[in-house]
Image: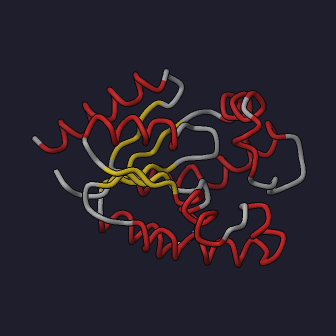
């Protein structure tokens, strides 16, 4: 298997943590589209949004997706990457899409516990638990519709990686 693997899901589901571990297990490269954008723009996500708005951020996000995609690479995408139909089509056609599914309550707990992950500005200005419930309600069908595999992200990262590897092996057989 040499196709790129795209990790999708809401903030806090573990795309970066699991992506790193999965890349090590497979001998793949790892790229996080948000980190790539920060490095290439010399701005945080919050700064891009403040200067260019969400529309400008989403355009940069789409460009980053195309720039980082290569064979034998795990790509952790921003939670909203699935909002653009062109991004969904690109990921589905170019590689394997893994949706790390977790409920809104768990996502909110993780984001509150690890403020570093909260660098992205709030979408709604409301408490994180309410925001995550709204985000999942709006995006769940997109994540599921795009995914080649849906993985339970409520597990420990090592267990999630094992589940992803099992799913990849079963689909390659």
User: Considering depth in this image, is 41 or 51 the residue closer to the camera?
Assistant: 41
Q: Which colour scheme is used?
A: secondary structure
Residue 38: quarter of image: bottom right
Assign the C terminus to one quadrant of the image: top left
Observer-nearest residue: 134 or 169?
A: 169
Q: Position of residue 133 (x, y in %)?
A: 73, 42
Whole-percent x and y of residue 76?
Answer: 48, 51
Image height of 147 relative to 50, above or below:
above
Residue at (50% x, 31% y) in the render: 153
Image quadrant assignment for residue 104? top right
Q: Exactly how many numbered labels are in the figure?
A: 0
* Residue drawn 79% across the image and 46% down it: 131
Vertically, is 30 above or below 92?
A: above
- In the image, residue 164 lies at what x, y percent? 33, 35
Q: Residue at x 34, y 51 (%)?
A: 29
In the shown orientation, is residue 121 left or right of residue 3?
A: right
Q: Where is residue 139 in the image (x, y as percent from the top left)?
A: 60, 54
Q: Residue at x 56, y 62 (%)?
A: 81
Which of these two is toward me, 96 or 26?
26
Answer left or right for 118 relative to 144: right
Vertical placement of residue 114 versus 95, above or below? above
């Amino acid at each position: 298997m040499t196709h790129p693997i795209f990790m999708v899901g809401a903030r806090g589901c573990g795309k970066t943590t699991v992506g790193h571990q999965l890349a090590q297990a497979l001998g793949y490269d790892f790229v996080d589209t948000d980190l790539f954008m920060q490095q290439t723009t010399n701005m945080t996500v919050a700064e891009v949004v403040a200067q260019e708005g969400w529309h400008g951020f989403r355009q940069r996000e789409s460009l980053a997706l195309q720039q980082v995609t290569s064979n034998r690479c795990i790509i952790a995408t921003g939670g909203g990457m699935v909002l653009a139909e062109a991004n969904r089509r690109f990921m589905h056609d170019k590689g394997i899409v893994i949706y790390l599914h977790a409920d809104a309550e768990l996502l909110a707990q993780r984001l509150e516990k690890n403020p570093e992950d909260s660098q992205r500005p709030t979408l709604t200005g409301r408490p994180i638990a309410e925001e995550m419930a709204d985000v999942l309600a709006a995006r769940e069908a997109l994540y599921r519709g795009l995914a080649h595999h849906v993985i339970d992200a409520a597990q420990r990262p090592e267990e999630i990686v094992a589940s992803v590897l099992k799913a990849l092996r079963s689909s390659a057989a």
